[in-house]
Amino acid sequence: MVVPKERIYGDLEEARCPVCSEILLEPVTMPCGHSVCLHCFQRTVKLISLCCPLCRLRVSSWARRQSREKSLVNTDLWELVRLSHPERCRRRLEQRDREFEIIIYASRKRSMTVSQLQ
């Protein structure tokens, strides 16, 4: 889906995810036209309801097809958001990477503890 530059460019409110209220990070634009972060999409749509979290439109078939084609992320919108708000995107990506590292560390530590118990 192509998003006109004037809709996003420089307008931080338009570049926010309506689920987490953060800058749109790797946005997914559903058939209803609503966009959310990839992480929010995975958390709310794929894992919970297979519906748009805003209008409740069922997106299960669309989501499966986009996942198979590896085209969930709206690359046009993602590029506009990155160009419009590079510093916010950089900080959010760093935050996501730190959270991912913590999850991996906790997972490894839990695995070590389980193996010590056996």
Image: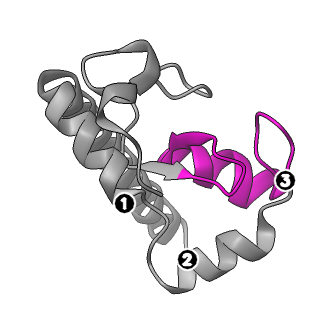
Residue topped by disc 1: 108
**110 lies left or right of 42:** left
Q: Quadrant of the C terminus?
A: bottom right
Of circles 1 and 3, which is in front?
3
Q: Which residue is mark 2?
A: 67
Quadrant for residue 109, please give it: bottom left
Q: Toward which corner of the image does residue 42 lie, by quadrant?
A: bottom right
Image coords of residue 36 (percent x, y)? 55, 40
- Residue 9: image location, x then y, percent: 26, 25
Q: Is residue 70 above or below residue 60?
A: below
Residue 105 in sight here: no
Residue linked to disc 3: 49
Residue 15 shows which numbered tag? Answer: none
Q: In front: 68, or 39?
A: 68
Q: CA distance from mark 1 to mark 3?
A: 30 Å
* Residue 39 shown in magenta: yes
Give SS at disc 1: helix
Where is residue 29? Give x, y as percent.
Answer: 55, 51
Residue at image point 85% right, 50% down: 57
Which tag, 1 or 3, sits closer to the chain's start? Answer: 3
Q: Any magenta on residue 90?
A: no
Residues rendered magenta in the picture:
29-57
Q: Amino acid at mark 1?
A: Arg
Decide if residue 3 is in sight here.
Answer: yes
Alpha carbon distance from label 1 to label 2: 28 Å
Which residue is rendered at x = 46% and y = 58% of the image?
Answer: 113
Q: Are marks 1 and 3 in contact (CB under 8 Å)?
A: no
